[in-house]
Structure formats: C-alpha cells, structure tokens
Image (tube, rainbow, N blue to C red):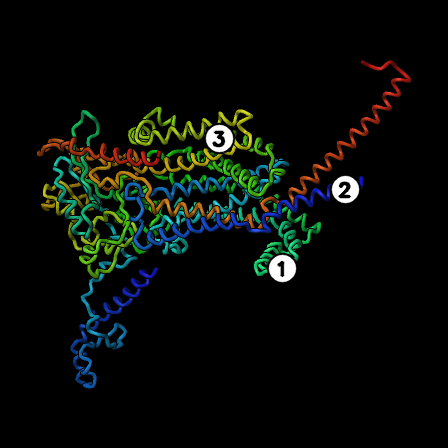
Amino acid sequence: MQEDNKQNNKTDRRNFLRKSLITGSILTAGAIGLEKVFPGEKDSGEKVKVLTPDGKVYVASSEHLKEYRPPPVTNAEARKGIANKKFVMVIDLAKCDGCKTCTVACQAMHFTESDREWIKVFKMQDADATAPYFFPKPCFHCDNPPCTKVCPVNATFKRQDGIVLIDNERCIGCRMCMAACPYSTRFFNWSHPDPKQTAAVGNTPYSPEQSVPRRMGTVEKCDFCPDMIRQGKMPACVSGCPMDAIYFGDQNEDAVTNASGVTVKLSQLLEDNAGYRHLEELGTKPRVYYLPPKNRKYPIPDMKSVGNEKKEKKHIEMDMGIMQM
Amino acid sequence: MATEKYNLKQEIETVREDCLRPTQKWGRSTQTWIGCLLIVMGWGLYCYIHQLRDGLGVTAMRDYVSWGLYISTFIFFIGISHSGTLVSAILRITKQEWRRPITRSAELLTFVSLLFGGIIPIIDLGRPDRLPNLVLFGRIQSPLMWDIIAICTYLVGSTLFLFLPMIPDMALCRDRLTVCDSPFKKFKKWLYTKMAIGWKGTKSQWHRLELTMTIMTIVIIPVAVSVHTVVSYIFAMTLRPGWNSTVFGPYFVAGALYSGSAGVVLGMAAFRKLYHLEKYITPRHFDLMGRIVLALTLIYAYLNLNEYWIPAYNMVTAEGHLLSDLFYGSYSKAFWTCQFGTVLLPIIIMSIPKGRTVTILTITCIIIVAGAWVKRYLIVVPTLLHPFMPIQEVPGTWSSYFPNYVEFSVTAACLAGIFLVITLFSKLFPMMAVWEVEKGILIEHDKQAAIELRTKREAEEAKIMGKRLKTGFEPLK
C-alpha cells in the first residue's frame, strides 16, 4: 500500500513536472526575464520558475527537474489499443536454428533477468519417430484468451488490436491467469525485482505497454512490444532474429514483415507453407502462427541434450521421499 | 407421578450442569494448550510477515507450480466446512432425534474452518494490499469472484446457523452467571447478555426461532453445495489436464462431505473425552455417524472412479502424462496410499459394526481427514507440473515442488487458529445445544409416558378380553 502511495505521489509529481516542462521550457526565457525583474530571488540559484498549462508560475528546485520519459500512452489508451489493427506473428520453424537471439533481444528490451524467457525456444519432438525441431514460443495473444477470462479485477485484458496486456498497477497477484494459461506463458514476480534491472529501467513511468518497472507480487508476460509498434518498429524478438524466422504484421493489411524487412502476404505465406497454430484443439485461437519445419538448413536439435524431464522427475522423487517420511 | 416430574427436572438440571461446566473454569491444561497454539500462530505470523516483505518467493512456489500448499489447504478447509451443514441441516430436516448433542460442534467446525479457509487465499495473494481492487474493478465473469461471493454468503449463513440456536443457551448462561466478582466474569455477563438479544423464552420468541431455523436449514444446504462446486470451478474452468473435468463440481462436493463428516466425528470424540460428555455423545452416535461417513466415502470413491478411470482408459496425450505420473510415476506412492489407504480401507473398516465403535471410528476418521488433505495436494500440484508445454532448461527448483518451512509454518498457524477459536468458543459457550438436548429429553420422556400409557391400556384391555374369554369362550392358543 505504502509503495503504491509513494508511486502515486511520484506520478503526481511527474505529472506536475511534465506539465511544467512542456510549458516551462517555452517560458525559460520568460523565467530568466522574471529573475531580472525580481532580483531578490537571485539568492536561490537552485530554484527554477516553471509555468503550468493553466498559466500559473511555480518555483521548483532545479534538482527535481529530471529528464522525464513520459509513457507512450495513458493507461486508458493502453487498454484500448491501436485502432484498426490486428497484430499477428508468424514463426517459420524451418528457419529457426534455436540460437535464442530472440530471447536475448527480448530480455534486453524488457530488462528481464536471464532465467525469465518471455519468448522461449523449446526443443520439441512430437513422437519418437518424428524429427525434432526448435519451437520459439512467445505469448500467443489468443483471440479467445483463457487468461483474461479468469482475471477477477480486469488487470489483464484483450485490446482491440489483438494484444493481451497486463496492468501491474492493478494486478492482485492471485495467479489465476497463470493457472488458466495452457502455454505456461505467464511469469510471476516472486521477489523484489533485481536491483540491477531496476537501475537500468531508471525512472521510466509505468505503462502496461512497456511492462516496466516491474513490481513484486504481480504477473508479467510477453507484450508484443506495443511501445515499439507505436514507434513504427518491430517487436524486439522479430528484429533480433538473425534467421529471419519471425514475421510480424497486421492481419487487416494481410502483410507480415521479418527482420530483414521482407514483407510478404500473410495469407499467401500461411497457404504456401501450410501454416498452423499450436494446440489448435484447445480453442484459444492464438494470434501466433507456425510454419512447419520442412526443408531445414540447420542440424536438428539434439533431444538427448534436453534431458530435463528426467532431472525434474528425480527432484520430484526426492521431494516425495521427504513427504512419505 | 410427582416423583417422576421431579426426576425430569433433575435430569434437565444435570444436562445444564454438564453443558456449562467447561465454561466455568480454565484449567492449567487449557492455558498451556492456548499458549502452545499462540506460539505456533506467532511463528506463522512471523513467517507471513517475512513473505509480505520479500514476496511469495520465500515459499517453494515458482512459475510452474504457482499454487501449492496454500491453495490445497484452502480446498481442504472449505471441504471440512461442509460438516456443519451436513450433520446439522440434513439431520434437522430429516428430524433425526440423535443429532441433538452434536449439532453445535458441527456448526462451529463449519464456521471456523470457513473463516480460516477464507483467509488462506488472501495469504496466497501476491498483493494483499490491493484487495480493494476486487470491489473497485471486480469482474463477475471470473471464477475467483464466484468463489468470493459463495464463500462470503456461506460464511454469513453459517454464522447465523451457529448463532440462532445459541440464543436460548446464551439466555441460560446470562441467567446462571449471577456472581460477577471479576472483570472477566463481568465481560462474560456482558457478552451473554448481548448475545441473548433479549431472549425471555416466550411463546412467540420460540415460535420465531423455530421458524428462522427452519428457513436457515433449507437455505444453507444449497449454499453449502454451491460453495464447493464453485471452488472446483477455479480448477475446472481452466484448460489444464486433470482439472478440466466435468465431474469436478460433484467430485469436490463429495470430497468435502467425506472429509467434513469425518471432521465431525473427530470433534465429537474430542469433546466427549475432554468435557466428559460420554453420557450424551454415546457409542450409538458414533455408530450412526459411522454409517453416514461410510455412505459419503462410498459416494466419494465412486466419483474417484469416474474422475480417474475414464481418462485413464483413453490416456489422451497431456492428461496421459499426468495420469502416468500419478499411477506409476513420482506421485504414485502418495496417490495409491490415498486411494487404498484413505478411501477403500475406511470403507472396509466402517462396513463392519466393530469398525464403528468409538476408538476405531475415531482413528479411521483421522486417516480420512489426513487423506483428504493429501488428496487436495495431489489435485493441485501434479497438474501444474504437467503443463502442455514441456518443462525445459529451467532450474530444478522450478520444475519440482515441495512446500518449504514458510508454507508449512503459515499453514500450521491457520490450523492452530482453528483450534484456538474452537477452544475459546468451548470455554465461553456450551458445546452442546442445551435447549435442544433438553427438548430431546422431553420428547423422549413424552414418548416413554405414551408407551407406558399404551401398555397400561393394552394390559387393561387384555384383562377385559381375558375375562370375556373366560366367561364366554374357550381361550385361543
């Protein structure tokens, strides 16, 4: 609670300062002029006069005037999304060589710790006789999202442009959405955010579109980088993929683009390559399509190196041993 | 006839004495017991504060197993809370006379386990400070919201259900506590006076009490059923293997009744022994309760069959992984112990009349209650460890789960809280509904009188008949 109040206070101050900076900069000359008019105030060299939008002059300490990075949009706008857009992602499994550059790019973009992978590259093998393949998995931003349905406070929501976001200023941390998501896409901030990452985030104000600064006790996940989209750029994982395996675009325009800037017709791409969605039978209607791993130019993943299943089982057995004692 | 009436009065007086005796003095053992509970609760509180400050990361829960012991315990406690409704309401509605000495403890168990069951999800919240958001931004579409509404309704209902039959007893306590020589006694007097809300025992008051009790009895049953159904919906409404099951509503209700009725037996056994109520809570009560627990265990076993046998026959991919882990994987020991040890074994024991004697039934019910708790854990955790996406390249602590000391401490504190409230309650208020037991005695007495009257009349008639037969005809053989 206290933290929130603090946050609110900060936001208030920021709002004030933002207003101040916008209009105040115009009046910088005026302020200097004022100082000349009132030389008595010259002693307070650290004070700066600023003008609010409603025409009032305030005196503020110059040390409070830090660089202010306004959120790209207000919270209300972040909930609405970008009009007339339907964002969609296509991942070409034939091109993915499992280098995990997308994960690293995403982590850098969102100041994420190295063990938290909003886009995670799995090594998949559907049956014993079938070929293994790499499978990068971001949030699927489903059109029938099981996660937003179960949220008791509307902290996670579906926008008109198809993106599913989380408002970590509202999330109560019940983790119902994590239980509901069949793709293990959601992460919980179990502890205080890593101080190094917090420092890197700096004083960026929070917006659901940026997902930072993160807060303890709230849920987070892949956000399709809406702040980048608003700047006309690609999400971090798309532009970071050296294999040009990830395409991103607008379904309404029927066009998707990859890291090299190659734009292709979405419907044609899906048609030519027999595009599909993962676990279609669950009925969640993902906005992420996959192209099957056919005619690959890279060696198939070594499934022996996965071995996590066995390791994990061992752990469970150990724990169960304790329980039965 | 006069002596008989005197006996009746004497009997009622003994009932009142026996019921109120535990409330009159706080022995050394009680104080030690309360002290122990407070220590457990204090340590739990310390752990919870630790969790509040440093986040839920101090527990063993991680992103895969995002619900653990807390949520399992939540389902378990809500399950136990079905006891009061079952024993009290259903036995009331079916006019089972033998219910009278055990209704109060059953209703109390409901109230207390519901109270702490309701607290646990708040303990499990990442941001308990944002609870007001549930009101400010609440979404009725969320199963969690259904839960909150159902549990709050049930809590209000069960509080009323506990309180209403207490009113005449409170008046009795108020009238009996004449010497208020200490501040504590003054407090008790004040409490009884307030809680008796001006009960004088007039005809209209009795009439109104009985009417409200009848309404409450009917209303509380669907509310209780709804509560555990909705608790199951938290799981059943997800797409997870093992949770996404249409049988989950009745399965949870059956599981709740199975553990709750066993909880009532434990309560009966404890109060019988501790407060020397052997005269009132008799082996017959245990025999009859044993039959009820047996019936409910059979229903629960039947639903277990449906819950596991149908998917096990098909072994669909994701569910198949989960089931093989339960049947012969890392959870198999716990799973089969639950199925055979705490469901089938109790069924066999309780089917034999000797299995429904006081000691054996109590031990069986301890097994049932413990088994129900472990079963809740086996419903929550293994499913979370078998998501659709494989668990790959994550630290070992993420891909496995066993509750750590923080979770055990906080859960133990909640359990201690339940015991504390029950202890304090039983030291302030009579643990048997005095007036109900009295009424039972009166009914019994009337019945006896009626039987006596009938046998007398029949004897007289036989005499007359005999005379007639002697004088008129040959007696029949």
Mark 1 or 3: in front is 1
Which amino acid does the dot numbered 2 rest on?
Lys
User: Pointer 3 and pointer 2: residues touching (CB < 8 Å)?
Assistant: no
- Horizontally, residue A279 falls left or right of residue B171, namely left
> Which quadrant of the figure contains the N terminus of chain B?
top right
* Residue to which mark 2 is pinned: B5
Give residue B211's position: percent from left, percent from top. Answer: 64, 46
Disc 1 versus disc 2: nearer the observer: 1
Q: Nearer the viewer, residue B435 or B283?
A: B283
- Mark with earlier residue (1, 2): 2
Percent position of residue A193, x then y: 24, 53
Residue carrying label 1: B180
Mark 3 against mark 2, which lies toward the viewer? 2
The answer to whether the residue labelled 1 contacts the one labelled 3, judged by CB atoms less than 8 Å apart, is no
Q: Chain of mark 3?
A: B
Helix, strand, or loop for circle 1? loop
Say the numbered circle drawn on residue B118: none
Mark closer to the chain start, 1 or 3 = 1
Secondary structure of the residue carrying numbered label 3: helix
Q: Are marks 1 and 3 on the same chain?
A: yes
Q: Is residue A302 depicted above or below A44 in this figure?
A: above
The local crowd at label 1, few if under 14, some if 14 to 19, many if 20 or more residues have their Cα within 10 Å, is few
Name the amino acid type tagged 3. Answer: Thr
Tag shown at residue B297: 3
